[in-house]
């Protein structure tokens, strides 16, 4: 590792805000709250603010703020490739290898999965917008999602007690699933569901909703059929096949500090909440439900890995940095990125960011302070974003309040 340098090249970033329809509205959105740090951001109280992008992706590129001027982060890196560090520069072709985001989810988005790299290359020939992607989600607020196939016995139970689900899947696939007579039964049943006609899905979903509503009205407990979630999803996407997916996929509510790693070919969907997200530098998925966007059902069903697991098995573990008690590390099994959470207590007047051998981006989630030892002082507030070059250390002076900072980086 090269000797650490002082922070003359730590720079502040101006980051892109995405306003997809599923985002939280106005100041209810963490994305909007962070974006307010930028003087050029103008809040609209009735507008959805869904994603805050930190990186070089062309659909939402960050800009370097330096000496009163703005320039694309990608151009700045191109002119200063040493900021990536030697290994990252060589292996990733002089490009920043990750995209860092904040998500604020108000309503469900996409039953989806990310292709692995070989499959992504094949899909790219057919759909140029498809590239490899995988990511880590770490929650800022309780975050609700669907992730991975449920344990097989749970899926079998739902098929047995929900006749409308069995009707959509069909008798042959249902029998194979509940009797364990076919090692590919789960794939066949899920594919049968996802490829069912819209008329069949709407009819059976309508029957299920009516039956559950009648039972609820008469005082019966219907929680064993995921009724609350079903009603909510149908209110957002009436008649959508994704409403039935809750009986196949784990319904997970992550608490602040917990994370999921969404590897290739893992089915998932985001339902509600605010989270940090880091991914390989693309923004592409294959979708099949709970979305107005293009659906590629056949590709999704074929590419998925039909491995069953519990909710707990889909929660990604974190670890304490052995050299810094303020830092918690989320280190997925990929080389493109790692994420760390830095919590600086109010009792700590200053904090030293340690040098890393690759590039990093950090965002202030709470608290305030300043980077004092740059060419010009950078004030840190909620929403401040910094690009930190490889092999660079610097000091942050902290005000008398707790600070929480997230740092995404690539170290090889």
Image (spheres, helix red, strand yellow):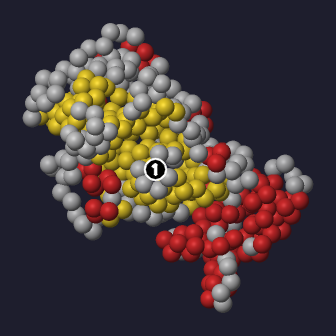
Q: Residue furthest bottom?
A: 218
Quarter of the rendering containing residue 216: bottom right
Where does the image place residue 230, in percent across and percent down from the top left? 59, 71
- Vertical arrangement, residue 234 with respect to residue 313, above or below: below
Query: What's the residue at 53%, 72% (across, down)?
Result: 232
Where does the image place residue 256, in percent across and percent down from the top left? 46, 50
Query: What's the residue at 82%, 59% (across, down)?
Result: 177
Res 312 seen here: yes
Q: Is residue 39 left or right of residue 58?
A: left
Quarter of the rendering containing residue 394: top left
Where does the image place residue 292, in percent across and percent down from the top left? 48, 63
- Vertical arrangement, residue 47 with respect to residue 64, above or below: below
- Vertical arrangement, residue 168 with respect to residue 409, above or below: below
Res 214 seen here: no
Query: What's the residue at 33%, 59% (across, down)?
Result: 29
Q: Is residue 139 left or right of residue 9?
A: right
Nearer-the-camera pick, 9 or 380:
380
Q: Which residue is mark 1?
A: 256
């Amino acid at each position: 590792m090269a000797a650490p340098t002082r922070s003359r090249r730590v720079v502040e970033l101006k980051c892109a805000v995405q306003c997809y329809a599923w985002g939280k509205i106005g100041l209810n959105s963490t994305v909007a709250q962070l974006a307010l740090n930028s003087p050029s951001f103008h809040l609209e109280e009735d507008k959805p603010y869904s994603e805050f992008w930190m990186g070089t992706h062309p659909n939402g590129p960050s800009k370097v703020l330096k000496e009163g001027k703005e320039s694309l982060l990608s151009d700045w890196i191109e002119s200063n490739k040493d900021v990536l560090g030697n290994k990252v520069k060589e292996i990733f072709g002089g490009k920043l290898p990750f995209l860092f985001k904040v998500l604020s989810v108000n309503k469900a988005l996409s039953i989806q999965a990310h292709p692995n790299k070989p499959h992504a290359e094949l899909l790219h020939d057919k759909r140029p917008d498809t590239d490899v992607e995988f990511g880590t989600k770490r929650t800022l607020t309780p975050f609700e999602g669907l992730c991975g196939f449920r344990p097989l016995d749970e899926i079998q139970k739902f098929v047995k007690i929900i006749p409308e689900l069995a009707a959509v899947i069909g008798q042959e696939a249902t029998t194979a699933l509940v009797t364990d007579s076919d090692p590919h039964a789960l794939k066949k049943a899920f594919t049968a569901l996802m490829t069912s006609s819209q008329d069949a899905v709407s009819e059976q979903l309508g029957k299920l909703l009516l039956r559950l509503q009648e039972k609820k009205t008469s005082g019966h407990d219907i929680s064993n059929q995921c009724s609350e979630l079903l009603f909510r999803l149908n209110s957002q996407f009436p008649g959508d096949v994704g409403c039935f997916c809750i009986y196949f996929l784990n319904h997970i509510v992550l608490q602040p500090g917990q994370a999921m790693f969404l590897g290739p070919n893992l089915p998932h969907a985001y339902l509600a909440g605010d989270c940090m997200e880091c991914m390989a530098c693309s923004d592409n998925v294959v979708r099949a439900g709970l979305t107005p966007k293009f659906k590629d059902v056949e590709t999704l069903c074929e590419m998925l890995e039909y491995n069953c697991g519990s909710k707990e098995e889909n929660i990604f573990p974190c670890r304490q940095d052995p050299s810094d008690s303020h830092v918690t590390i989320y280190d997925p099994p990929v080389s493109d990125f790692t994420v760390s959470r830095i919590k600086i207590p109010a009792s700590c007047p200053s904090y030293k960011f340690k040098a890393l051998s690759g590039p990093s981006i950090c965002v202030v989630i709470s608290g305030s302070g300043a980077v004092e030892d740059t060419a010009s002082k950078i004030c840190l507030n909620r929403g401040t974003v910094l690009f930190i070059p490889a092999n660079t250390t610097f000091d942050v002076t902290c005000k008398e309040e707790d600070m929480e900072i997230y740092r995404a980086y690539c170290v090889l």
